[in-house]
Amino acid sequence: MQDLISIEDLSRGDIENLFSTVDHLWRTPDAFRHALAGRVVCTLFFEPSTRTRLGFEAAAHRLGARVLSVSDVRNTRLELGESLLDTTRMVGFYCDAVVARHMEDGVMRRIKEAVRVPLINAGEGQLEHPSQTLIDLYTLKEHFGDIDNLHVGIAGGIRYSRAAKSLIAGLRKFTNIRLHVVDAVHEADEGTEFPRELGELNGVPALEYSSMKEMIGHVDVVYVVRVQQEKFTDPAAYRCQLQKCRLHRALLPRALPGLVVMHCLPRTDELDADIDDTPQNKYFQQARHGVAVRSAVLLRCLAVEPGVGARGRSRSW
């Protein structure tokens, strides 16, 4: 049994094996309907979520597992002062795998010390979102056939986005990827350079642009992330940062042929709805991949081989 705490925990081979499982799931879904029969998966979310929580729960149900869900921290004894580790330790006693989300950086490593079943990181602070990264990489692989040699553009609040930072870490597993960025900064970081260590891929720094308009003609993929309006105190500063990252239909004629547009969702004003009915839109397909990819993650973490079904005894109680 294996955890998934960071995309850094996976090798390129691990990622490609997961993708093979996803392909198998798409081809023969009936072969997996009872793969996790008798298992219990708990989704423990200390932070709001729609796609990630429902994606893991749908995946567990489709694989035949039962689901326990904590979607609101107010429904736990944390409100009365119980420690995070005690809460998660108790949850680990009740299930075969824990899928957790928390707003604090680094907390998953601490939780793992208390939980003796596989732990899956469903989003942590501003640093980690490994299952989203697997969805993103699978979408690229499905569309392009290969992830190597792509020019990938990311626009939005990159330095504050766990989805963006986790994706960049995932891209480091592949070869000859060139990263291009349009970085929306909060007021405290105005005028600072994009962090070199964040954007560097295999020794090559990211190419930084002043606007989406300037970047779009240089990339195969535009991955848009939210400009976090709630972090701004000055509405004018937010509008300025949003405008330089915003993608709308009028910019598409400037793009390379075959451009793909992605977004981890939810979107706000950084990605216009007028992109929805264009061939460049891959963000709904990206979201559609969520259940299959998270199914593959559950199978890996619970040590179930594709097409084999549950291995070993179910938990006793």
Image (spheres, rainbow, N blue to C red):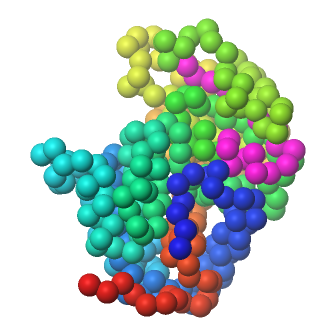
Q: Nearer the viewer, residue 67 or 135?
A: 67
Any magenta on residue 175?
Answer: yes
Q: Quadrant of residue 288?
A: bottom right
Task: Determine whether, in the image, residue 204 is placed left or right of residue 266.
Answer: right
* Residue displayed at 46% across by 72% down: 59
Q: Quadrant of residue 135?
A: bottom right
Q: Does any portion of residue 218 appear in the rendered image?
A: yes
For the C terminus, the quadrant is bottom left
Q: Nearer the viewer, residue 152 or 279?
A: 152
Any magenta on residue 203?
Answer: no
- Looking at the rendering, the stretch of residues picked out in magenta corresponds to 168-185
* Residue displayed at 25% across by 56% down: 87
Image: 210 above or below 166: above
Whole-percent x and y of residue 281? 64, 49
Whole-percent x and y of residue 177? 82, 43
Q: Nearer the viewer, residue 178 or 27?
A: 178
Image: 224 above or below 12: above
* Residue displayed at 49% across by 12% down: 188
* Residue displayed at 51% across by 76% down: 302
Q: Does any portion of residue 250 appear in the rendered image?
A: no
Image: 109 above or below 53: above
Image: 277 above or below 252: below
Q: Nearer the viewer, residue 118 or 33?
A: 118
